[in-house]
Amino acid sequence: MNAPRKAGMAAVLRPQMSDDGPDFAVLLVRRSQRASFMANAYVFPGGRVDPADAEVDPDAPSRYAAARELTEEAGLSVAEPKTLVRFAHWITPSAEPKRFDADCYLLSLEWTTPRHDGGVQVDGREVFDPLWLTPREALARYQAGALNLPPPTVCTIEELEAERLRTLHDLRTVESLSSSLPDASALLDASTLVSALLSSCRQRVPYPLLPKLISQPDGDGIAIVMPWDPHFAELPGEGTSWPGVAANAQAVPQRITRCVLSLAKADETYAVRPENSQSVRWQIERLPQ
């Protein structure tokens, strides 16, 4: 069993308005189809911790790594990496040949400065084809088989949507209470939503999530099983059961418990190999209502 390498990911939130009001899009980039880990999948910008990261931020080197990788992969510089908000903590299943212990951080696009004209510009070596999608859009495309998201990424996006809904509800409650005041100003815009969400998420305490990778009983596929799956503890493999992604987090109704993938389409390293495909349909199972 290989020990996981520490890594950091940056989920950038871009404030925007949607049909039903304030919203945000999150930045996803496609990994190279030749990558040895999660090939052809859409992920948050990120990468492993380098020794220099620990020198700059010895308390949380993965935070600095996330900010550095965001600059290297997507051309977005972060003036104050320590402002990034720790949101989730994923560890690659012990059955994998290549493993990472990755912290996922949130930040607003408004905290960044583009290094190139026009905003995001991917490096074209490790990552390609940047997408800005709202959590709802990303989840809909994933469930339709039109967007290849690794299981940890899609579960993190589910968390983002749950936090968005809670923050939006809280802001609308405040707006309703203050609307009768003579000097009340418009409280509810997209930047306010993102700022409030980031502030609220500082209270989250991510669990160290180590999913299990198992073979399907028919031998024709693999399953990534989440630590909150009802049968997680009895399945073979290393990992601790957890009730969700983090403490002090908004509940996700009917969250994804496992993702199943045919071995004809991918291998045990999440790599989607067909040359003419950038997406694959994971078959998902959810908690009951």
Image (cartoon, helix red, strand yellow):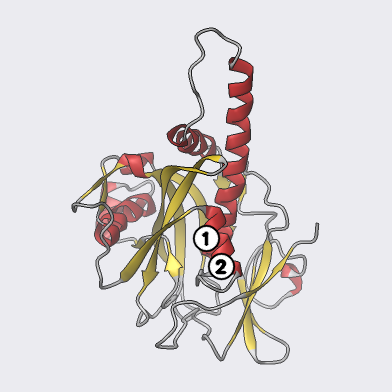
Secondary structure, mark 2, is helix
Q: Residue at x 37, y 50 (%)?
A: 63
Q: CA distance from mark 2 to mark 1?
A: 6 Å
Q: Is residue 241 above or below residue 34?
A: above
Query: Does 238 sit left or right of 10 as displayed?
Result: right
Given residues 115 and 99, the one toward you in this image is: 115
Q: Which mark is residue 138?
A: 1
Q: Is residue 169 above or below residue 43?
A: above
Given residues 93 and 14, the one toward you in this image is: 14
Q: Residues within 10 Å of mark 2 (few under 14, many from 20)?
A: some
Secondary structure, mark 1, is helix
Given residues 149 and 177, the one toward you in this image is: 177
Q: Is residue 62 in sight in this rendering?
A: yes
Q: Which mark is residue 142?
A: 2
Q: Amino acid at mark 2?
A: Tyr
Q: Residue at x 59, y 55 (%)?
A: 158
Classify residue 128 by image quadrant: bottom left
Q: Residue at x 46, y 54 (%)?
A: 104
Q: How many marks?
A: 2
Q: Position of residue 275 (x, y in %)?
A: 40, 88
Q: Amino acid at mark 1?
A: Ala
Given residues 78 and 55, the one toward you in this image is: 78
Looking at the image, the residue that sits furthest to the right is 289
Looking at the image, the residue that sits furthest to the top is 182
Question: Mark 1 and mark 2 in contact (Cβ < 8 Å)?
Answer: yes
Q: Is residue 48 above or below residue 12?
A: below
